[in-house]
Amino acid sequence: MVTRCLICNSSVVLSKDAAIAIARLIGTLDGFLQGVQQSTAKRQAIASDADAALRPLERAFNLMVDGLAGAACSWANTSDFIRDVRKHQFMEYDCLCLRCGAKYDEQPR
Ligand SMILES: [Zn+2]
C-alpha cells in the first residue's frame, strides 16, 4: 500500500515506524563495524603467535563476536539517535514527505 502525501501527492513518504527501523539498523551496523574495527586494531597491536595460528573461520567468528559486542555496547547511542529522529524529524506526526517536507498523521481509509 502506497501512502501519498496530503500536500504534493508524492509517493515518497516515510512513516515514523520505518524511520525508526532504519535508524535502528544504521545504529546497530555502526556499532557492529566499530566492534570489528577495534577488534582488528587490537589483534594487529598484539600480533601474538596464538592469534596468528587461528584458522580463517575462527578469525571470522571472533570478529563477528566482537562486532556483536560492539553493537550491544552502542545501544545507548542508537537509542539517542532514534529519539532524535523521532523528535526532530517527525515531532508528534506519523508521516514525513521526503519531497516537500510535509508532516502529517496518516488518514483513516
Ligand atoms: Zn509532499
Image (tube, rainbow, N blue to C red):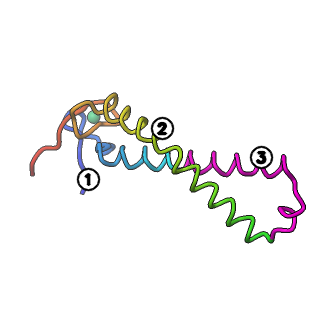
Q: Residue at the location (83% across, 50% down)?
A: 44
Quadrant, the N terminus: bottom left
* Image: magenta residue range: 29-54
Residue in front for this viewpoint, 89 or 81:
81
Residue in front for this viewpoint, 38 or 102:
38
Q: Which disc number belongs to residue 41?
A: 3
Q: Which disc number belongs to residue 2?
A: 1
Q: Residue at the location (35% across, 35% down)?
A: 83
| Left or right of 106, for residue 48 | right
Helix, strand or loop under label 2: helix
Q: Amino acid at mark 1?
A: Val
Q: Residue at the location (25% across, 34% down)?
A: 8
Q: Residues within 10 Å of mark 3 (few under 14, many from 20)?
A: few
Separation (CA) of disc 1 from disc 2 = 32 Å
Separation (CA) of disc 3 from disc 2 = 22 Å
Expressed as whole percent of the image width and height from the top left, the position of residue 36 reads 67, 52
Which residue is tagged 2?
Answer: 77
Principal SS element in the magenta part?
A: helix
Expressed as whole percent of the image width and height from the top left, the position of residue 6 reads 19, 37
Q: Amino acid at mark 3?
A: Ala
| Residue at disc 2, CB closer than 8 Å to ligand 1 | no
Helix, strand or loop under label 1: loop
